[in-house]
Amino acid sequence: MVGANLTRFGGPFLFTDVEAESLNVYASRPWQVAWMLADLDRIHWTKVRWVYWPDLKVSREAAIKTRFDPREYARNAKPAAEVLTEYRADLHNPAYRVVWANGLGYDAYIVRNWERECGVPHDDTYLLRSIDTNSLLKAKVKGWKPDISSPEAFLRWQYQGSAWIEKGLKTNQTDVGRARGIEHDYASTHDAGSDTELLYKIFKQLVFELEF
């Protein structure tokens, strides 16, 4: 990832986001997932799926925050295993760099739970292709230099950044997007499709602000 191998010269990228039952990373299952294939200059396609669980239990806090609509869910949800198969086909495509916001601290755990509930062997090899904007945004503020000596080193560096907690250090996508003057329908955030679109817009700036 040096010189012409910097991320800004690469692609395509798979931007993704999940909405889940709660913040419990050990048990929560996704009820909505979005993933978008894009290069820095164009979006190729976007997929948004609702994930059906017969015993779905969206916490009150999560339902309010994400504006979860049981009627919309009932109309659109597809079997969890069916959506997982479709999602994993792209997530595990070695040609794609996976980009998410706090994916290392949340979304990847939700994907693991999803696999477990569907009886699918856990496979996190895609993490070596992952880029987490949560860590990059912290690096931008703190002046950290990403360790891009190898994919393994970059992943370790991102996990260290993901675990860093500091009062007043904001990496929430909505806050970041507004602070950066990014045009977006902020009333629609916490919908997986909207969040994936905002992630793409933020990433297109970050990729030229840091060397990774």
Image: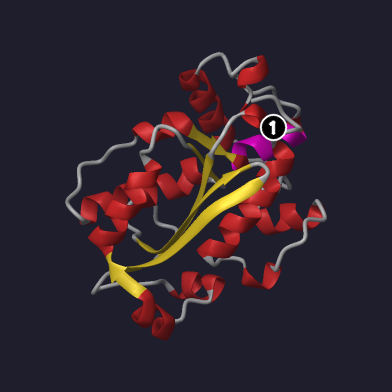
Q: In the drawing, does residue 83 fall left or right of residue 163?
A: left
Q: In the drawing, does residue 137 fall left or right of residue 89?
A: right
Q: In the drawing, does residue 42 fall left or right of residue 87?
A: right
Q: Which residue is more in the foreground, 70 or 99? A: 99
Kindly identify the amino acid type of the residue bearing the numbered disc 1: Ala
Percent coordinates x, y for residue 64 in the rendering: 53, 76
Percent coordinates x, y for residue 6 in the rendering: 64, 23
Whether residue 22 is visible: no
Percent coordinates x, y for residue 58 in the rendering: 39, 72
SS assignment at label 1: helix
- The residue labelled by disc 1 is 139
Binning the other alpha carbons within 10 Å of mark 1 as few (below 14), some (14 to 19) or many (20 upward) gives some
In the image, residue 170 above or below residue 19: above
- Is residue 138 rendered magenta in the image? yes
Q: Which residue is more in the foreground, 169 or 80? A: 80
In the image, residue 127 above or below residue 202: above
Percent coordinates x, y for residue 153 in the rendering: 51, 19
Kindly identify the residue that appears in the image at 51 percent across and 16 percent down. 150
Q: Residue furthest bottom?
A: 71
Q: Which residues are magenta?
A: 134-141
Whether residue 183 is visible: yes
Kindly identify the residue that appears in the image at 20 percent across and 55 percent down. 118
Query: Most prominent secondary structure in the magenta stretch?
Result: helix
Picture quarter with the C terminus? top right
